[in-house]
Amino acid sequence: MFNKLIIKILVIPVLLAVIFTSCRDDAWNEHYASQQTASNETLMQTIEKDPELSEFARILKETGYDDVLASSQSYTVWAPTNAALASGIDADTVTRFLQNHIARFNYSTADVANLQSIRVRMLNGKANPFARTAGGFTFGSANIIKKDIVTQNGVLHTIDSQVHFFKNVWENVSSTGNTDSIARYLSSYDIYLFDAARSTEIGTSPKGIVYDSVFIYSNAWLTKYGRLQLEDSVYTMILPDNNAWTNAYGKIKSYYKTYDKLLGETATTKTFQLTGISADSIQRAHTCQALVMDLVFRGKLDVIPGDSLVSTNGNVFHQPASLFTGAVKEESSNGLIYKSSNLTYKAADSWQKEIVVEAEKTTGREFANASLYTRVATNEALLFQISEKKYIELSPSSTNPNFQPEVVLEIPNTLAAAYNIYCVVVPAYERDTLALKDSTKVSFQLTYVDAGGVMKTNTAITRDPSTNLLYETSPKRLKKILIAQNFKFPFANFTGSPFMPLGSTKQNTVKIKVKTNVTNTEFTSGKYTRNLRVDCFILEPVNE
């Protein structure tokens, strides 16, 4: 079935090739008209007449490619001599070997500028360099012995060695025996969709119409992190072997521990089943995704940068050489792979990142006992200290001390890991440089699923855990208030991901509330106001 797919998908490129061949041939024939006369023989006939190419001619005949090179289509052939083929074929199949030495269109040495090269698209989709050097001409790593032999349907060059066939990065992932763990995972995103518009009816059966079928291939992981299967893209990939996969999986797994289905709820709590198939599948999906999301880098990294390196996922790795320690570099047709038996990246660089939740974001936000305003920072003294230069301001809607201004924000994507948790509050000075008595006292509450599977809200936190001092805002200074130190969430909290199992979306179970904490006496005396200005919440990972 998939052979038919390949044939069908090649139909449009072949038609385009015919069109462009005609255009290219016109220019090429014009170029050669004044230099030499094209032979009346086909490429195949010309190859057969050269005793130094007898082995290459034999392979063409055995595979049926002699008919291809005798057709009216135009091709360029870089033919290895008998000596170059004496040790056997440098490819895993004869077809790949031949297709790696034949290209559509006519390519002559006149196409190559002095000391420069062009990339020639071969029949197998690979792109090989055709270069003019100080000593002559090369194709791939081979030297050209005889050049620009013009035939009825193309150009022949003879070369002194085979052009090595390199698999692309995706082919290396898929075909290397000791990397089948990552290959199975990434291939699980392969999708083949039937394309009725490009499929042809060839008959009927008791089950309905029979098609010569065309399928469209897609892979969500490749789309997001790098189209490793495309020859015109260039990537470097760290490719973990099965040992590296197993060790990394064991290291990461605990960060994504999660609970299972909801067992019941009351007005104030929810209780979840601690273990189950759903919990296991979600944990596995996130663990695998964390394992592979920072393995791909753009470009061909023959030399690893000394300062920093950015993965296609967007994470920045400082001193990136450590990622490649002990890895074995191998060429691919569209980049490089570094085969590794040990993945060395750290949680804080990859899967356990700082979480910042902006108070001005309305999604997952609730407030009470206040009027809420979104402010754009304008005070130059504070402008670059305020995250995204925006914050919220809450003004009390009641003088009743039992109804103090409060705001609750959902905190997404927390891991089963430790964090230092902060709230950044903005002073009144940001908007009013004369408001030097506008400070308030605040308290906090955390909501999360505890180790027993109960989603609960803890008691109010009123003091800094590092100093035991009551929380108090400053009228002039932006403050980063420590809410909890080295706080470990028992379960990961992910609300959804394109790489989670189908149907496994979950509600957000982590929230933080901040509210003013001012008594009537403190309020009426003017010691504190009940105005509250919140920039963001920050969860900083604690390295373990």
Image (cartoon, rainbow, N blue to C red):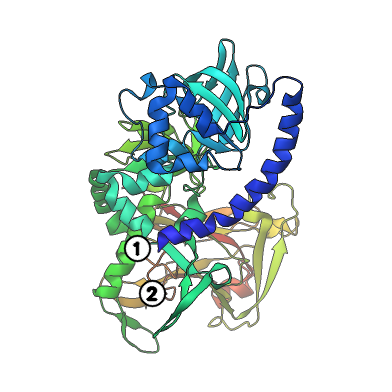
Q: Looking at the image, which is closer to me, 196 or 61?
A: 61
* Residue at 41% across, 29% down: 56
Q: Position of residue 380 (x, y in %)?
A: 74, 48
Badge 2 density bin: few <14, some 14–19, many ≥20, Cα 10 Å: some
Question: With 456 as the anchor, is 354 left or right in this view?
Answer: right
**Local secondary structure at mark 1:** helix
Residue corresponding to mark 1 = 285
Which residue type carries mark 2? Answer: Ser
* Residue at 56% across, 54% down: 479
Q: Are marks 1 and 2 in contact (CB under 8 Å)?
A: yes
Q: CA distance from mark 1 to mark 2?
A: 10 Å
Q: Position of residue 495 (x, y in %)?
A: 44, 70
* Residue at 53% across, 83% down: 402
Q: Looking at the image, which is closer to me, 147 or 310?
A: 147
Disc number at residue 396?
none
Which residue type carries mark 1? Answer: Ala
Across the whole image, how many numbered discs are drawn on residues? Answer: 2
Badge 1 density bin: few <14, some 14–19, many ≥20, Cα 10 Å: some
Q: Is residue 72 visible?
A: yes
Q: Is residue 295 visible?
A: no
Q: Position of residue 378 (x, y in %)?
A: 75, 54
Residue corresponding to mark 2 = 504
